Image: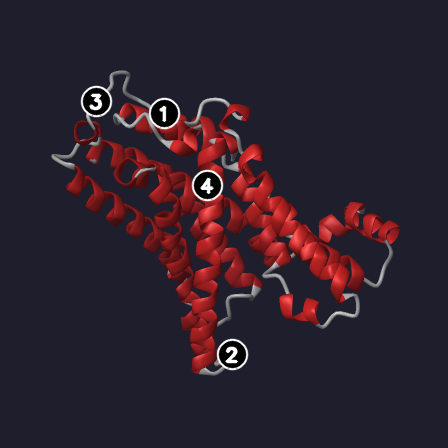
Amino acid sequence: MAALGGDGLRLLSVSRPERQPESAALGGPGPGLCCWVSVFSCLSLACSYVGSLYVWKSELPRDHPAVIKRRFTSVLVVSSLSPLCVLLWRELTGIQILFLGPLMQLSMDCPCDLADGLKVVLAPRSWARCLTDMRWLRNQVIAPLTEELVFRACMLPMLAPCTGLGPAVFTCPLFFGVAHFHHIFEQLRFRQSSVGSIFLSAAFQFSYTAVFGAYTAFLFIRTGHLIGPVLCHSFCNYMGFPAVCAALEHPQRRPLLAGYALGVGLFLLLLQPLTDPKLYGSLPLCALLERAGDSEAPLCS
């Protein structure tokens, strides 16, 4: 995946040796057309990813192993074809620190001690069970790999020449957030909650995934590789949204809230130094903008 996010995209996005104006480099008559093509391309990619989940007719819920296996096939096919969309478009136009508080909360509430916990984590039998668990594979492996490839590695190179790197960080995640709205249909179909609760949950999920998408987009631009966003995505899927309300009512509330505050503070403090582009070599998106005539992208330095 690092090759897909780094060298693979470098080959796709930096293919012309001479410097050209933006409109000429993108194959369009002007930046206005380029922006419409970029946005439409990203929307089409998002619709293709979500639409591939529904090519199989089934009366079973999304968590059924048979449904998960079929959807694995769909998203892997779409993700494999997504880099070709970037090539076609060219022709046409530190997260664990942030979760310090939740990790402390998890350790406090865990019935086993540290030694027992490490034995469980390192046991081959535990990993074997995970690899045969369809929901675990979906949440920790397939979804992070395919979603980061499609919604970050393929969309950002199409948006950045149009919007610039900074706006692209906040525009690209909107497609990622909207792509999660399809969960509404299944929740309504199986009547998992009231209509109001379902739509409220969808709005919250859109906000959360959009913010997370902005972070992984920033991470992808600053490092030039996909492995970081994929690992962060997998970790966040495992942790879920921090249980702040439970932390406020926890018996050890003060040290726990201090851990939450310390995690957020350290995350903000170390975000720039740990993603310094000098640590990661040549950045494909920055090179793409240089080819398009924009050599002053602040995220590239």
- Asked whether the residues under the numbered discs 4 and 1 touch, taking CB atoms below 8 Å apart as contact, a structural biologist would say no
- 247 is higher (above) or lower (below) than 28: below
Q: State the quadrant of the C terminus.
A: top left
Find the distance from the CA under tag 4 to the CA under tag 3.
26 Å
Mark 3 vs mark 2, foreground winner is 3
What x and y, as percent, mark residue 229?
Answer: 52, 42
Instruction: Give the left or right position of residue 253, taking residue 76 as reference.
Output: right
**Mark 3 or mark 1, which is nearer the start of the sequence?**
3
Neighbor class of circle 3 (other Cα within 10 Å; few <14, some 14-19, many 20+) is some
Instruction: Give the left or right position of residue 17, taking residue 70 as reference.
Output: left
Q: Which residue is drawn at 34% across and 44% down?
A: 167
**Outermost residue, bottom direction?**
194
* Residue holding disc 2: 192
* Residue holding disc 3: 20
* Residue holding disc 1: 287
Element on which disc 3 rests: loop
Neighbor class of circle 1 (other Cα within 10 Å; few <14, some 14-19, many 20+) is some
Q: Which residue is drawn at 31% across and 38% down?
A: 164
* Residue holding disc 4: 218
